[in-house]
Image (cartoon, rainbow, N blue to C red):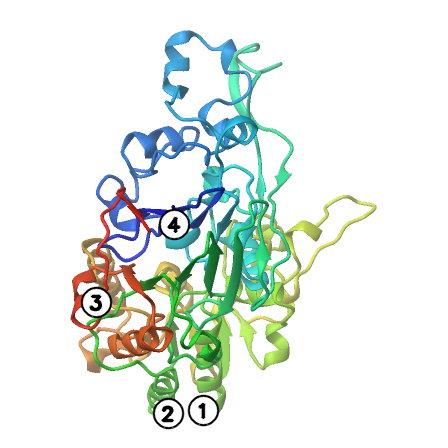
Amino acid sequence: MTKLTFYGGVNEIGGNKIHVNFKKGGLLLDFGQSFKEEAEYFEEFLQPRSKSEYYDLTTLGLLPKINGVYRHDAFCPEGLDACIPSVQQYWDKPLKSYEEEKETGWTPDALWVSHAHLDHSGYIGYLGNMPIICSEETKRLTKAISDVGNMSGYQSDLLEMKPRIIKSRKTGFFPDSLFIDSDDPVPRDYPDFKPNTPYTTENEITITGFNVSHSVPGAMACLVEADDTQILYTGDIRFHGRVNPDLSNLDGLAPDIMISEGTNIEDTEPDNEKQVQQNIQDIVSETEELVMVGFAWKDLERYETVRDAALAEGRIPVFDPRLAYTLARFGRNIYDEDASVFVERCESMIYSEDDYKKSKHKAGLMDYDLWDSKKDSRNTDTCHLEKGVYAYDLHEDPSAYVLHLDFYRFKNLLDIQPSPGSLYIRAQCEPFNARMELSDERLHRWLKHFEINPDHEYKPYQFHASGHACGPDVIDFINRVKPKKVIPIHTEKPKTFQQSFPQTILVEKGKTIEL
């Protein structure tokens, strides 16, 4: 009998964590971070403690209690027995680790990752070294996120695991005292995986991935087959991107279960990425001042939209160095695409090459792993410092550029000193929770201080095409697939599915359903 347990993504947008258990073996479908649930306990300056993240998150119920999935060093770092019993109790959890259960009990055959957004992949670092099945593009994007995404602790262990180990200090103020360190990294297991090509696990579970359109590259839906049961999981999906993969091979599939996202299930009209480009062009054409556009640096389709809009109006598109670094992981050089990179001031603030040794992506495109400071084998990349666009360039000739600048990089306005009447476009979603609304108030103050968008009440111009399908597109897709049962996920409106699909199953968080 097949069992499904939904540990996240239930009555919320994001945080997907689905446990599928077959007669023999099973899978995890995504293992994402729930921003909604974490916001109930944490905020900017109140975060899980870096050396006891697992303890903090499980104690608060933010990480589900599942036997056989978590890495052993999160429970019990090597050397814990040297600590006093009162300390050891904090590491004693009533769960078996992945490593323990791999020897004697149940563990997942694999983790399926639909795409590299943190609400689907953010908790991977806590898992044991099980096979991670995803697209090659997702793996490459994960590499970029790991390098430049400002992640730390277990959450940074996306491509490799750095085992935590308790050691004794040899020198310092307190020699012989204990501390937690990281041992030599162990690469995570990412098997080769290609779209439309079945992959079979050790327990004869077959996974087939299908490319879909979303707001990051590499997104996939998947078909899981075992025990004469078919489960289709959409991940996040849309049908209005710049490129929309053909999913006609899923028409009439009639799986036993279709787990469908429904973020925008009550929206009646699809968004249009082409219209976003035209709207940006219209704004640029009306001014001789600097135009700035905010959007997520992982969204490479939006990059192409903004790039093409700027070039169509005779301007040089200038992008965040994180985006340029990500493009390079896909074998693309941003300078070969008629675009440039913004050179941020950092560290000493004097544009010295030494300022960029800790933020190598701000200096050049070369993979972090290839940088070398040794005298005899020195290897560096400073192409941005040589070819990029500086704040003073933007100030002196604003009509020549369109700048990619999201809100969390607004400190660069202090160096750019844009002229009054400069324009700012937000090409990403509008605020939808209290934290984002507070950030929006701060954004408004920045715009007003620099007299940006004065004819728009100092508010950002809003042009966006969602990474999620509208209601009619979701309904059409489900009608084409013809599933026996539908399970809505990644939505705050699951009951809306019942209006079109009486075979809808409304699941509860943490509760198991049986097929």
Instruction: Name the residue that disc number 4 marks.
Output: 32
- The numbered dot on residue 313 is 1
Identify residue type, mark 3: Phe
**Which mark is first along the chain, 2 or 4?**
4
**Which mark is first along the chain, 1 or 3?**
1
Q: Position of residue 5 (x, y in %)?
A: 33, 45
**Which mark is first along the chain, 1 or 2?**
2
Q: Is the Cβ of the residue at disc 4 closer than 8 Å to that at disc 2?
A: no
Residue at 65%, 32% (x, y): give it. 184
**Which mark is first along the chain, 3 or 4?**
4
What's the CA distance linking mark 2 and mark 1? Answer: 6 Å
Tell me if I can see residue 4 in this picture.
yes
- Mark nearest the camera among 2 and 3 is 3
Out of 409 and 495, give the one closest to the viewer.
Answer: 495
User: In the figure, 350 relative to 52: above or below?
Assistant: below
Mark 2 lies on a secondary structure that is helix
What's the CA distance linking mark 2 and mark 3? Answer: 43 Å
Q: Residue furthest right?
A: 376
Instruction: Name the residue that disc number 2 marks.
Output: 285
